[in-house]
Image (tube, rainbow, N blue to C red):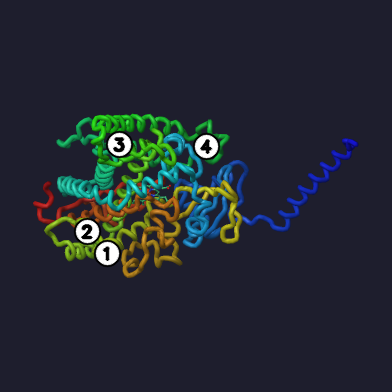
């Protein structure tokens, strides 16, 4: 016999009520517990609390709400970790759950639709990219095989600086020229840019050094911006700040550069046929793209995205760190004296510092760590994304929450560092704190699954250039500026450079024949 429809309807109604009350009772019995944080406004959430230097705004808020803080930025929940203990929760204990990245306009437009590694969501493409970086591009053997490039470019660098001695020099421009030259040769096989006034102009170059530097600066800026459309998606189409338009314009320039580089590499590969041997990282990527059974096919976008990771990751980061180091040292000449005493003892005055000397330069290492503590390149680690609901330190974190780790804040925590505002390399002497993600209080390269894959190369470039700058030159401020007046203001972006580039004057301190190459 068929049940009357009123009976079916009543049963369905009762079942729904039972289901809803179960949720209600469950929620009431076990209410969700979010980390403390400011009350959000409708639509904008807490965006009104984020100033032009977001890491500093978040640091100030964390002083009030604690080392794990919950905010709403636009439409999305955000948590901010500002202590080593909380960083450990996200980067070590629950590493896998937080190993993804949120989608952003920068990932879409200038990082080849998330086909690079840095912006790629956690998944098969990212895993394959990571494997390629760790096993192929950054193996100790591969990095070692490019040592001759670092040596040649370092010599050219000190020689260029010697030519500028006695004059005020914008240091970061020279440092970027050095790092870009090293990375371009390792990744692209040659520099692919021309330098005005340089008689060793690279044949067949497509951009000038200045244009390439401008492209990289714009790339870093746009990757780091707080784009409103990323946080309030229904406003995305308005592009209120004009950033998406700038990203599209930059993408055209990047495409032109990549077309040139890849066409040249493919032509060479075809010409050489079976005799082809990979000479640079783009060669290696092209070779891997031809593998018959890859885990995930390396598309043309992936090749471009990964190449961009290599060029972007390797240039600005090291140049900015060394510029901060010299800015701090020039304010305290006694620290420079201590560093040069060590250099004279270990290296002597008859040659330049080599990579093999680095392990003996303890004070130099301490200067680098102290710079990374006070001026981490990534003041906020690039955002991580929760892929599942998770309980962190007793608090509920929902799937889809964005996670920021505030390394700048940790570097200024008086419970971790005595007088943190002071630049004191000595604090690292005799303390076993490394920068490779073991000690969570110092995280210049991040930690866990998404940790920087290029840290080894980054460390070599920073230590070698810093050591040679101090070994080869005496440093002072230009005549009309006092070191104590040197501004230490920051500019925000994907990396955090000085707001006002350092201008300094150098004089050679080694025998003059060493500067001529
Ligand atoms: C001073 C030098 C460098 C610093 C301070 C630095 C810092 C960082 C940081 C903080 C991260 C993010 C970690 C996280 O999300 O938890 C990162 C990721 C990354 N870095 Fe570096 N880096 C440096 C050099 C390099 C170099 C030389 C390369 C390559 C040539 C590179 C390529 C990358 C890439 C591809 C990622 C993304 C990794 C991923 O999302 O899986 N970096 N880096």
Circle 3: element type? helix
Q: Distance between the Cα atoms at labels 1 and 4?
A: 46 Å
Q: Earlier in the sequence, mark 4 or mark 3?
A: 3
Circle 4: element type? helix
Circle 1 crowding by C-alpha within 10 Å: few under 14, some 14–19, many from 20: many
- Residue that appears at 11% across and 58% down: 350
Q: Distance between the Cα atoms at labels 4 and 3?
A: 28 Å
Name the residue that disc number 4 marks.
Answer: 229
Name the residue that disc number 1 marks.
Answer: 363
User: Could you say which is closer to the camera, residue 35 or residue 37?
Assistant: 35
Which label number is shown at residue 356?
Answer: 2
What x and y, as percent, mark residue 275?
23, 36
In this rendering, which labeled residue sits more in front, label 2 or label 3? 2
Which label number is shown at residue 63?
Answer: none
Circle 3 crowding by C-alpha within 10 Å: few under 14, some 14–19, many from 20: many
Q: Distance between the Cα atoms at labels 3 and 1?
A: 34 Å
What x and y, as percent, mark residue 281?
30, 41
User: Could you say which is closer to the camera, residue 205 or residue 406?
Assistant: 205
Given contact means CB atoms under 8 Å apart, are the residues at marks 2 and 3 in contact?
Answer: no
Q: Earlier in the sequence, mark 1 or mark 2?
A: 2
Q: Distance between the Cα atoms at labels 1 and 2?
A: 15 Å
Which label number is shown at residue 212?
Answer: 3
Q: Distance between the Cα atoms at labels 2 and 3?
A: 31 Å
What x and y, as percent, mark residue 315?
31, 45
Circle 4 crowding by C-alpha within 10 Å: few under 14, some 14–19, many from 20: many
Circle 1: element type? helix
């Amino acid at each position: 016999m068929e049940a009357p429809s009123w009976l079916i309807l009543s049963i369905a109604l009762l079942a729904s009520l039972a289901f809803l009350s179960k949720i209600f009772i469950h929620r009431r019995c076990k209410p969700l517990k979010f980390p403390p944080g400011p009350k959000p406004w409708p639509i904008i959430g807490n965006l009104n609390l984020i100033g032009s230097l977001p890491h500093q705004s978040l640091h100030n808020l964390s002083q009030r709400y604690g080392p794990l803080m919950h905010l709403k930025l636009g439409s999305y929940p955000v948590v901010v970790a500002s202590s080593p203990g909380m960083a450990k929760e996200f980067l070590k204990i629950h590493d896998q759950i937080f190993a993804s990245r949120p989608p952003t306009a920068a990932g879409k437009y200038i990082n080849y639709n998330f086909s690079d590694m840095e912006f790629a969501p956690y998944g098969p493409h990212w895993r394959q990219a990571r494997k390629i970086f760790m096993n192929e591009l950054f193996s100790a053997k591969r990095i070692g095989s490019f040592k001759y490039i670092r040596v040649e470019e370092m010599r050219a660098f000190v020689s260029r600086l010697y030519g500028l001695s006695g004059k005020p020099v914008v240091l970061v421009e020279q440092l970027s020229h050095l790092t870009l030259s090293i990375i371009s040769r390792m990744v692209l096989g040659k520099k692919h840019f021309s330098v005005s006034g340089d008689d060793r102009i690279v044949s067949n170059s497509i951009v000038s050094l200045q244009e390439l530097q401008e492209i990289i600066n714009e790339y870093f800026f746009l990757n780091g911006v707080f784009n409103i459309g990323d946080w309030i998606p229904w406003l995305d189409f308005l592009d209120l700040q004009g950033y998406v338009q700038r990203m599209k314009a930059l993408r055209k320039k990047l495409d032109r550069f990549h077309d040139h580089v890849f066409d040249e590499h493919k032509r060479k590969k075809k010409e050489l046929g079976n005799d082809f041997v990979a000479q640079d990282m783009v060669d290696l990527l092209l070779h891997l793209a031809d593998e018959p059974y890859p885990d995930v096919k390396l598309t043309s976008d992936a090749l471009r995205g990964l190449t961009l990771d290599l060029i972007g990751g390797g240039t600005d980061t090291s140049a900015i760190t060394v510029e901060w180091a010299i800015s701090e040292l020039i304010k305290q000449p006694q620290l420079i004296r201590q560093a040069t005493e060590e250099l004279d003892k270990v290296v002597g005055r008859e040659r330049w510092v080599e990579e093999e000397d680095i392990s003996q330069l303890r004070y130099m290492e301490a200067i680098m760590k102290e710079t990374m503590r006070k001026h981490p390149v990534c003041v906020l680690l690039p955002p991580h994304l929760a892929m599942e609901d998770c309980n962190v330190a007793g608090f509920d974190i929902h799937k889809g929450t964005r996670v920021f780790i505030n390394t700048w804040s940790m570097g200024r925590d008086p419970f971790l560092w005595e007088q943190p505002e002071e630049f004191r390399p000595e604090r690292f002497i005799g303390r076993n704190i490394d920068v490779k993600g073991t000690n969570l209080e110092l995280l210049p390269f991040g930690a866990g699954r998404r940790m920087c894959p290029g840290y080894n190369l980054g460390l070599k470039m920073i230590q070698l250039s810093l050591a040679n700058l101090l070994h080869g030159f005496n440093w002072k401020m230009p005549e009309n500026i006092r070191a104590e007046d040197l501004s230490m203001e920051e500019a925000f972006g994907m990396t955090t450079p000085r707001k006002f580039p350092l201008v300094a004057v150098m004089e050679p301190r080694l025998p003059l024949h060493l500067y001529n190459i």
